[in-house]
Amino acid sequence: MANEDTKNTSTVEATEKATAQSTATTEQQAPQPDPNALSIGDLKNLTTILDVASTRGAFKASEMSGVGYIYNKLQAFLAKVAPEQVGTAAPTSAPTEGK
């Protein structure tokens, strides 16, 4: 009977260790990015979209001041943020010319 108690105790301890390890692994995983978050690239694309749409005449003349205001605001924000990201970005190698 004492032998059975030892088996039960070791089984419980093994189960607790396995649960603790799987919980630790789950907690160590990197958090998933928010799919609805806007990135700097998204904002750059938005300025391009505004530029192309205004060039193609998608906005009425009365709407152009609002579109221009948002465009200028986005450009100013990107100019402010862009130098900060250049320092954090990984350096890229310059292309070499083929001979």
Image (cartoon, rainbow, N blue to C red):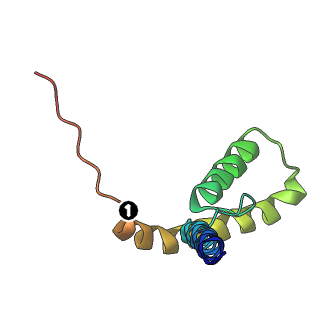
99 above or below 91? above
Q: Position of residue 92 (x, y in %)?
A: 29, 50
Find numbered disc 1 in the image and state the secondary structure of the residue it sits on.
Answer: loop
In the image, 29 versus 85, the foreground residue is: 29
Which of the 4 image quarters holds residue 20?
bottom right
The residue indicated by pointer 1 is 89
Which one is nearer the viewer's eye here, 78 or 91?
91
- The percent position of residue 36, horizontal first and vertical second, equals 75, 60
Callout 1 amino acid: Ala
Residue at 87 percent across and 58 percent down: it is 63
Front residue of 59/16: it is 16
Q: Is residue 66 toward the left or the right of residue 51 in the image?
A: right
* Figure disc tally: 1
- Residue 94: x percent and y percent? 23, 44
Q: Quadrant of the N terminus?
A: bottom right
Farthest residue in the top direction?
99
Q: Residue furthest front?
A: 1
Q: Which of the 4 image quadrants contains residue 6?
A: bottom right
Q: Is residue 90 left or right of residue 15?
A: left
Quarter of the image with the C terminus is top left
Which residue in the rendered view is the most extreme toward the left?
Answer: 99
- Residue at image point 63% right, 50% down: 45
**Is 2 or 91 nearer to us in this picture?**
2
Q: Against 6, is 60 above or below?
A: above
The image quarter in which residue 42 lies: bottom right
**Dot 1: few (<14), some (14–19), or many (≥20) neighbours within 10 Å?**
few
Identify the residue at horizontal 64%, vertical 62% (top origin).
32
Q: Which residue is drawn at the image coordinates 55% and 66% (left, top)?
A: 25
